[in-house]
Image (cartoon, coloured by chain):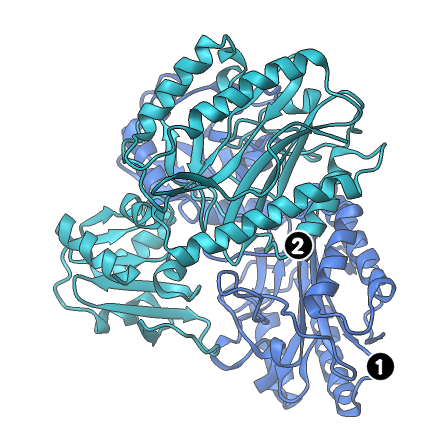
Chain colours: A cyan, B blue
Amino acid sequence: MERIEKISQVLKNKSINSAFILKPLNIFYFTGELVNGVLYVSQDDAILFVRRPKERPLSTRTKTVFVDSFKEIKGYISASTGRAGFELDSIPYNLVAKLSEALEFREFEDISHEIRILRMVKEPIEIEKIRKAGEIIGKTFSQVQEVFVEGMTERELLLELDYYSRKNGNLAIYRMHSFGNEASFSHILQGEDALVSSYLDAPTGGPGVSSAFPQGSSNKRIEKGKPFTIDVMVNFDGYVADATRTFALGYFPEDFKVLWEKLNSVFRFLCEDLLSGRIPEEIYIKTLEYVSSLGVMDLFMGRGKDRVKFIGHGTGLEVDEYPFIAKGFKIPLSENMIVAIEPKFVGEPFGIMGLEDTFVINNDGPESLIPFESSLILL
Amino acid sequence: MERIEKISQVLKNKSINSAFILKPLNIFYFTGELVNGVLYVSQDDAILFVRRPKERPLSTRTKTVFVDSFKEIKGYISASTGRAGFELDSIPYNLVAKLSEALEFREFEDISHEIRILRMVKEPIEIEKIRKAGEIIGKTFSQVQEVFVEGMTERELLLELDYYSRKNGNLAIYRMHSFGNEASFSHILQGEDALVSSYLDAPTGGPGVSSAFPQGSSNKRIEKGKPFTIDVMVNFDGYVADATRTFALGYFPEDFKVLWEKLNSVFRFLCEDLLSGRIPEEIYIKTLEYVSSLGVMDLFMGRGKDRVKFIGHGTGLEVDEYPFIAKGFKIPLSENMIVAIEPKFVGEPFGIMGLEDTFVINNDGPESLIPFESSLILL
């Protein structure tokens, strides 16, 4: 089924007459063109109203009409539009109000959740792009040995890897669904920097180098025997993969290695459940019980009150896609879903350790899309 | 006056009892801390409700309360809250609805415009940051001669400059107010690439290298005698400056140089009006008349229907700040405003030429914050 027909199906199921998609990334997903405009979908029709660009040739099979204002849309859609669906999670209040007024809607309904569900199960072409993003991440991790020089700061190492990943095809745009979150290429965090949480809904935050962007790496030097994590995101042709590895200069402290075995076992425990049919909420609860049994609950997934409430998330056009391995997420895993699993320990005195892979769920189990060793890496 | 008191003043002027600021960047502007939460401001009080981070020390003079949900806020604010102000331009519909429900609001009003007006006139410390961003841009333009190698593509040159700018302090985050717009470090555009418009509200778009991010440079080689523009944005400690210069490898065609003189005269014409007290709309109309008198209206500020309706914009924490040099913008220029002026010609067969500087408006006239020659640059 064409992606756009899947919205029509959603409308039928919810007894909604029409949907108005305004988020450019969703317009791209459904039409293949990222434009500023409105994608109108009814139970049996679809029109892409383009505000901008008008002078660039667009290659979409969706019927396209160029408009300057919302009012012009009215002439093209059926007179009795009834209830309308909007992406109320993402669209600013004023824009919803303006469109409703122009089209004389009184009733509208949120279809954010339904669109996220449509995007959750990937097509082969999408998986190939995430696989390519994963390959760039693998090459980027390999590059750490090449570019690392003693005396480097977290941020200096980050800049080298960022440059390398772009040279190798990283589009370097990191989109998020959740309002107020901002993603960046990589967090390289060591010791006390890893203990700093941030406004981001992520297990690690980091101090950053500016109060105006208070996340990620600092200008602290990478020290001997002080392990650090590199959490990398790469965007290939719109699709992101996400991975984390743990490194140290010189040596890993002995007690660090002992703790690492626990992290590793949590990772393997999680992987065993990445199977079609399993319920994310159940995986989450089970894993937390397992972490508790290892006696490391206070280290798991962040500091104190800033501990995050998930241990895995989907990726795709955004980095916070469905499914979430979290309480409340009850849609069973299924083939062709993408899940990044990211168990992380944060605490004193060791700082941080983490292991994250982006997986595709195949019919015979999970397949990692990150072609890079998952052990501790010594520099 | 403290920034936060200025909101209280807005509330008094508009007879609104309270404001709820949710956009992290605005929370940062008013409190000095970029958090995920709600900044509540009444006519005589302010409380920062922080959802995240809770474990990171915050240095703000604003009274701070940690909360997990919107409902908890209710206990801290006056029982009779009456009409409330929200940033309806920026906050997703669902978030406004959720907060209104938790706090039992029926009436709310948009204060997006008022906040943009507060942010429009900069304090000395903000101007210094934009000045610093401008210095990094100047150094980055100087670097073009150093890193350019014959045979390079637009994108390859861009990656070198991006890397250099970050090494020199560019935070590399580019925030925009307008929904659906996405900004990036630089557009390097030559010939036919410059004729491609995009979803961005910008005089130039560019094809980009992916349909999922269809803006900016392509993988086309930079050719001899085919001028190109480098439009650069740098973020220093939260604040952006924006500038454009025009380059060519080998030589500039003679007719290009003739046309360049016209562009230059438009730039100078505009600068003469960047004075405290002048009305942006009047500057805009006057400049368009001048461009018409030069016989180049069809080349000005974009292609055909994608021509943009401004010739200058403010910068600051975002790149599309007030004031706009555009029709409808009637707030007079005043001291300590920041304006990026960007006359550009786009057309066949020459492709593109552009000149853009970010200015601060001083009491004796505009001062460019871009320390780099404004003439054509030969490589």
Going 24% across and 57% down the picture, which residue do you hit? A6
Categorize mark 2 by other alpha carbons within 10 Å: few (<14), some (14-19), many (20+): some
Q: Amino acid at mark 1?
A: Gly
Residue A92 visible: yes
Identify the chain of the residue marked 1, using the numbered disc in the image: B
Left or right of B154, for residue A368: left
Residue position for label 2 = A166
Is residue B236 shown to the viewer in this render?
no
What is the spatial separation of the Cα atoms under label 2 and label 1, in whole angstroms? Answer: 28 Å
Please state if B175 lies on the left or on the right of A152 as rendered: left
Residue appearing at x 39%, y 13% in the figure:
A289
Looking at the rendered image, the quarter that the N terminus of chain A falls into is: bottom left
Q: Position of residue A168 (x, y in %)?
A: 66, 56
Looking at the rendering, which quadrant does residue A20 occupy? Answer: bottom left
Q: Position of residue B285 (x, y in %)?
A: 57, 76
* Label disc, if present, on residue B250 of the rendered structure: 1
